């Protein structure tokens, strides 16, 4: 640090003030560095969370689509079997599969809805 030319006080006192100011500057630099590092870590955590949420949303959507598709295929199969002369017991068994698939789809949709935060209104 350059000497303070306008300081008219005791040189020892000025040196002590200068040393303390230097120490304060160093501490402020450390605090600032930690704040920057903390902000970067938070941004990384948010990015990781966004990636996980996007992947989870894709998986849930795929599961619902799969279950709905299977339900449709089972319903189609039931109709084909009915047309081919299947017995009422056989058709009831197929209907049971459809009911189970529909219940699974509804259960998954309900779980997603229950764990999804309600949209918040932007501050006016």
Image (cartoon, rainbow, N blue to C red):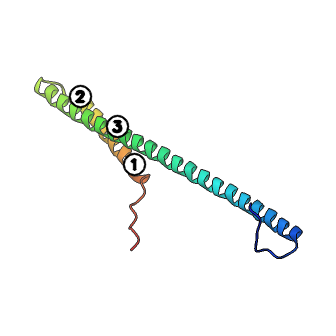
Residue situated in front as seen by the camera: 32 or 104: 32
Quickly name the residue at label 3: 63
Disc 1 from disc 2: Cα separation: 35 Å
Are there few (<14), some (14-19), or many (20+) residues within 10 Å of tag 2? few
- Residue at 17% across, 31% down: 76
Identify the image quadrant of residue 83: top left
**Sooner in the amino-acid sequence: mark 1 or mark 2:** 2
- Residue at 81% across, 68% down: 17
Q: Is residue 18 above or below residue 91?
A: below
Secondary element at image label 3: helix
Q: Which mark is residue 92?
A: none
Q: Are marks 1 and 2 in contact (CB under 8 Å)?
A: no
Q: Could you tell whether 110 is left or right of 68 in the image?
A: right
Q: Residue at the far front: name it.
A: 5
Are there few (<14), some (14-19), or many (20+) residues within 10 Å of tag 3? some
Q: Where does the image place residue 111, in percent across and percent down from the top left?
A: 41, 48
Q: Which mark is residue 112?
A: 1
Quickly name the residue at label 2: 89
**Sooner in the amino-acid sequence: mark 1 or mark 3:** 3
Camera-near label (1 vs 2) is 1
């Amino acid at each position: 640090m350059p000497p303070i030319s306008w300081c008219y006080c005791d040189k020892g006192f000025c040196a002590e003030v200068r040393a303390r100011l230097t120490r304060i500057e160093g501490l402020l630099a450390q605090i600032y560095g930690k704040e920057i590092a903390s902000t970067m870590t938070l941004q990384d955590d948010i990015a990781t969370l966004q990636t996980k949420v996007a992947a989870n949303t894709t998986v849930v959507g795929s599961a619902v689509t799969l279950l709905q598709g299977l339900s449709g295929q089972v319903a189609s199969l039931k109709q084909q079997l009915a047309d081919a002369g299947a017995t009422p017991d056989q058709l009831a068994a197929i209907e049971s599969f459809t009911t189970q698939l529909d219940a699974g789809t509804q259960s998954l949709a309900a779980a997603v809805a229950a764990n999804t935060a309600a949209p918040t209104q932007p501050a006016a």
